[in-house]
Image: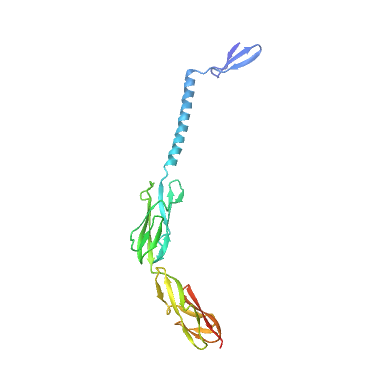
Amino acid sequence: MRRHFSGVPHMVLFHKSGITQIQPPPFSPADVIMKGLRLGLSILFLGFLAVSVITCAGDLALNGIVISPDNPSTPVGTTLQFIATAYYNDQTNGDITTQVTWSSSNTSVATINSSGLATAVAVGTTTITADSSMSTSISGGNSDTTTLTVTSAALLSISIIPANSTIPLGTTQQFTASGTYSDGTNYDITTQVSWSSSDPSVATVGDSGLATAVAAGTAIVTATFESISGNAAVTIPSN
């Protein structure tokens, strides 16, 4: 016996050998077409997403370059390493110091090599530029500049002459101080340093570097300019 359920289209009830069975309706051609369209659209959508992901990954571009240190200064004769950091449109960043093109606007003040190392040549200022050939997401984002100021040569060390001396009790010894600077030059800075003796009971030393033997023993004479100092030893033998 077959019976249709009210309100359920195409659902048929069969009685067979005392067993009730429900047979689902067969798919119509229209149903098959619709299901095929849905499946096809789903595949197309997934393919679009995959292509979008690959495209986004391949469109990495610069938002900008930043040079560090920013507006530094360094004495004549010294070197200074610059670093170029790239900031990308995917919110990441990286060191591209060796991938950019470096230049100095005034090579008579400072030069810079391909790895970003600048050499201070003369007192003055120059503009340091880092340029990248990468595509950018904003105008001008593939370069940055900073100003390098080169100052007068800095004192690197002090040498006292003579470095070791022996003088009789009651006599004097003139010491001189020679300063070595960052540009490779040396100057007499005897009257510019501060003089001191480690043991004034053995030997004293005046403002001009003149030491006087007071008693037998050994004293260390020191010449200091700012944070740089040099030492020498003076020995007074016993009679």
**Quadrant where the image shows the C terminus:** bottom right
Q: In x, y percent, where is residue 90? A: 45, 46
Residue 32 shows in the view = yes
Above or below, 22 against 97 in this view is above
**Quadrant where the image shows the N terminus:** top right
Looking at the image, which residue sits at the far right?
A: 18
Give me the residue at 40% from left, 75% from top: 187
Quarter of the figure with residue 102: bottom left
Quick one: 83 or 208, which is closer to the camera? 208
Above or below, 156 against 128 in this view is below
Give me the residue at 35% from left, 65% from top: 124
The total number of labels drawn is 0
Q: In x, y percent, where is residue 69? A: 43, 59
Quick one: 184 or 139, which is closer to the camera? 184
Give me the residue at 42% from left, 61% from top: 80
Above or below, 148 against 56 in this view is below
Q: In x, y percent, where is residue 129? A: 37, 56
Quick one: 213 or 113, which is closer to the camera? 213
Q: How is the image coloured?
A: rainbow
Q: In x, y percent, where is residue 24? A: 56, 18
Residue 200 shows in the view = no
